[in-house]
Image (cartoon, rainbow, N blue to C red):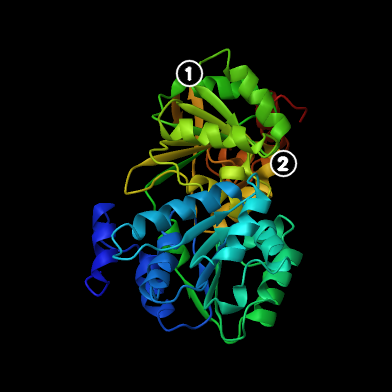
Amino acid sequence: MNTLSPYILKAIQELGFQSYTPIQELVIPKLRSGKNAIIQSSTGTGKTHSYLIPLLERFDSSKSTLQAVISAPTKELARQIHQFTKQLIQFFPEEIDLRLYVGGTDRNREIKRLESKQPQIVIGTPGKLLDFIQTQSLKVHQASMLVIDEADMTMDTGFLEEMDQLASRFSSDCQIVCVSATINDAMKQFFQKYLQSPIHLSIKQEQLTALPIRHWLLKTKEQERLPIFHQIFDAIQPYLALVFCNTKESAEVVYQAMTEWTKSVCLIHGGLEERKRKQIIQRIRQNEFQWIVATDVISRGIDLESISHIINYELPQDVEFYVHRSGRTGRMNQDGICISLYGYENDQYLNLLEEKGLHPTYVRLLNGAFEDAPIRNQRAKRSRPTLEKAIISKQVGPKPTKVKPGYKKKNQAAIVKVAKQIARKRGTRP
């Protein structure tokens, strides 16, 4: 950190940063070289500051032209990056023209402002950025750096075509940085087209699983989830709990039920209008709620502090999203708990989860308290003695060395007797 400019150093000290995270230690020195890069790390590891710090280190205040563009897949994430950038530039001696471009604002007014003066740093969503580029209002060919944050989420949510058109407008010597938790096939094609000889910067999986998070799995036993979730609600006292559902419909059902249990609950998903979502996130940050019911719209990127519990009412379809969801807790070295409901249909899913190095604790609820439960495949792995072995273990007396008259008949009768005893215990016929 001592190698940073005094303005950035003062800003991060003001924010309480005492040392770099592992991904920041790896990324910050490398991005200063100006090479194209792929940054791969999970949620909550400090990826945003890992590219913002070198971006601002290279910033030239003497140039009034556009120098850097940052793209984010959601308005909430774009606003958060904008806020982080404002914090980092607060002590710069010259004022930096930093602008945020997301939907829901006065388009004509923004275009008119762009025509009179270009910003130095721009942060926005792909659709909005491309709109200004296509109208030739935003002069991105002058930029020396393009950052695509949450690149996998960007391309999964239908922005691949927009990103293709957007990236093609930048100069060939522009540094392109893709920040992502995972890398899919669509991204690989994008990299081949626009990132010449990129450096791949990632942290090892074991570092991702070293977060202070306890992973608890609670079996539904093919019962209705809502009553089981109500038991979880009664059993914990979270500082702030985030309840994840896979669809806005199930999120609505859970939220409506929870409004009967507590007043300290809010709902947020992609179906809510932008103004409403913005208001809810602001109220969450003001600690007005203890429970948040949400879809994956805030599973990544949106930084909500002090989340003590993550509850997966439904496991996400993609195992990677389990990592993203659980990564909302266990931050800043604070302990976190991730509780997930699972059923028989999730067996293969849990195998994949364990292959990623996440070894959860299987729990059950008894009298309002959590206790350890047998692992889901314990019965399958346990070697059950065959009927023949069970009979042999119950033979009456030692095996005779000399066969007496009638021995075989008596021994067969003893075997049948033991077999009947075992059958009665199992509730089956011998």
Q: Specify few, some or many for label 1: CA neighbours under 10 Å numbering under 14, 14-19, or 20 or more.
A: few
In the foreground, 114 or 373: 114
The amino acid marked with disc number 1 is Asp
Q: How many marks?
A: 2
Which corner quadrant of the image does residue 84 belong to?
Answer: bottom left
What residue is shown with label 1? 234
Where the C terminus falls, by quadrant?
top right
Asked if residue 294 shows in the view, the reply is no
Residue 274, position in %: x, y?
Answer: 63, 38
The amino acid marked with disc number 2 is Glu
In the foreground, 78 or 244: 78
Residue 173, position in %: x, y?
Answer: 57, 86
Q: Is residue 148 left or right of residue 247?
A: left
Q: Is residue 51 left or right of residue 101?
A: left
Asked if residue 7 shows in the view, the reply is yes
What residue is shown with label 2? 345
Where the N terminus falls, by quadrant?
bottom left
The extreme front residue here reads 116
Q: Residue at x 40, y 62 (%)?
A: 49
Question: What secondary structure is marked by label 2?
Answer: helix
Residue 43, position in %: x, y?
Answer: 49, 54
Q: Is residue 258 left or right of residue 61?
A: right
Q: Specify few, some or many for label 2: CA neighbours under 10 Å numbering under 14, 14-19, or 20 or more.
A: few
Residue 216, position in %: x, y?
Answer: 49, 38
